[in-house]
Image (tube, rainbow, N blue to C red):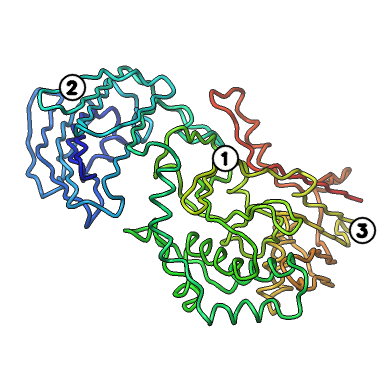
Amino acid sequence: MRANGNGTTNTYHHWIVRVLTPDGAGMLTTFHVPAYQGEQRARLLACTVFRRDGTVQRPPLQGASVRLPDLQPGDTVSLEGRVDDLAPTFFGDYFGLVHTFGSPEGSPVRSEELVVLAAKGRDYRLQELHGAPAAEATVLADGTQQWRWQMRELPRDKPEPRRPQKREFEPLVRITTYRDWDHFAAWWWNLIKPQLEVTPAMRQTVAKLCQGLDDTEAKVRAIYHFVTTDVRYEAWEFGVHGYKPYSTAIIHERRHGDCKDKALLLCALLGEIGVPCHPVLIFADPLRTTDDLTLPMVQHFNHCIAWLPPHHGQPGRFLDGTAVWHPTDTLPDMDQGAQVLIVDQGKAELQFVPVTTPEQNVLASEHTIALRGDGGAQLTTREAPRGNRAVELRMMLATEPARRAEVVERMLVQRFGKLTLGKVDAAAPASPEAPVTLAASAELSEIGQRTASSWQLPSAWVDDELLALAADDQRTRPMLLGAPSGERQRVR
């Protein structure tokens, strides 16, 4: 990869792949040089097939693609391609590279080499992790800085359920031209600052939401739930809008936006009631792979939330504008435990998002089952979830009142089997902040397994992933359990 002074890159790829199995041959029926459409030009320069019997084929190229002949185990394919940036982007002259050694699909790798040619006169910061070798550094005659990394005999990657993402354990090289996080934050703030505005219509919305509310915390809740529920979530992951939000005025008027749109709108509206609020860049991950933010880079993040510093006697906290039907004290699992970047007027602050406790994130349920001699039973059940365990039930009761009995029946059938639903007591919550409960009764046509001399009854109704995870007798990677949660079940 050549890193040019204006932020563009030119990349030459050379892949050599040996087919080991019929399934592998099926994966290589076609090949396309990966590139970002509209931002890069991709070309396939050469394709050579070395047959196991010693013959050589060169299939015709079709721009950036090639259709490969019928491959067999033992054949080897050599592919050469080039990808060129068409022009500098909104990132300016920033250069950032994240390279993970190893095959994306986990195949063993005989040899892999990365060479970076970096324009002279610029400062670059490098990071090598998890066994990646130190770079062989040289300076070419024209002043270009060259770094070379090479690794051999990378073993097959055997997937395991609930393991960390590969960036936590595979050999990894990162390069960035940002000096520090303040340098990065200043760039991003300059990109989003013009989008932050407050119109008369937005002030009217704040006034309406806060009418009759004297408590600042109640106003925060009202504004937060407007952003999460009244502003529809739509992802914008392409082009400049993958990083630059729309203006808050447009977001408010259209009533839709993505995560950074919602975070910025939250900042603008809360500012109208004197509550400070700053955008936060985060990597959303329900299981929480360890974040390493040593180097300031754009590639560290995939989500945006908001940070409320301590105010009016309230402690500081994070709010996620995409968290529909979440109370203000309940962050989605995908946000918890992350190391994040808070951007305050172009200044950067790294901070960790707190993690909940099982007591705050619990599903408490009680099932009373009156057995009948014919093998059936009368069921009375009650659930009282809290934290993220309550979000699904709260949303169901609030958004589908006409189908409430049908939804409850389906949920109970999945747990207890065939039944006839009786009474349902499940009122729609007054607000996302209100606790939610579900009580219902049903006739079970049969329960457990009966024989002529015995009746085997289930002792609990818990769908626990740990039961499946325990089937493997050993692991090579840590097991990630996600945000802490609790389950308390009482069966009579």
Q: Amino acid at mark 3?
A: Arg
Evaluate whether residue 31 shows in this view.
no
Q: Position of residue 155 (x, y in %)?
A: 38, 21
Residue 275 in the figure: left or right of residue 440: left
Q: Residue 260, relative to residue 15: is it above or below?
A: below
Mark 2: secondary structure: strand
* First-in-chain label (3 vs 2): 2
> 37 and 15: which one is in front?
37
* First-in-chain label (1 vs 2): 2
Q: Residues within 10 Å of mark 2 (few under 14, many from 20)?
A: few
Q: Residue at x 16, y 35 (%)?
A: 79
* First-in-chain label (1 vs 3): 1
Q: Which label belongs to residue 372?
A: 3
Tell me the quarter of the picture where residue 382 sits.
bottom right
Q: Which label belongs to residue 288?
A: 1
Separation of residues labelled 3 and 2 (CA atoms): 85 Å
Residue 116 in the figure: left or right of residue 336: left
Q: Which label belongs to residue 403?
A: none
> 137 and 333: which one is in front?
137
Q: Position of residue 357 (x, y in %)?
A: 75, 43
Q: Amino acid at mark 1?
A: Arg
Q: Residue at x 63, y 53 (%)?
A: 318
Tell me the quarter of the picture where residue 175 sits.
top left
> 325 and 274: which one is in front?
274
- Look at mark 2 in the image and give the residue it sits on: 139
Residue 88 in the figure: left or right of residue 321: left
Q: Position of residue 243 (x, y in %)?
A: 39, 56
Q: Residue 11, relative to residue 345: is it above or below?
A: above
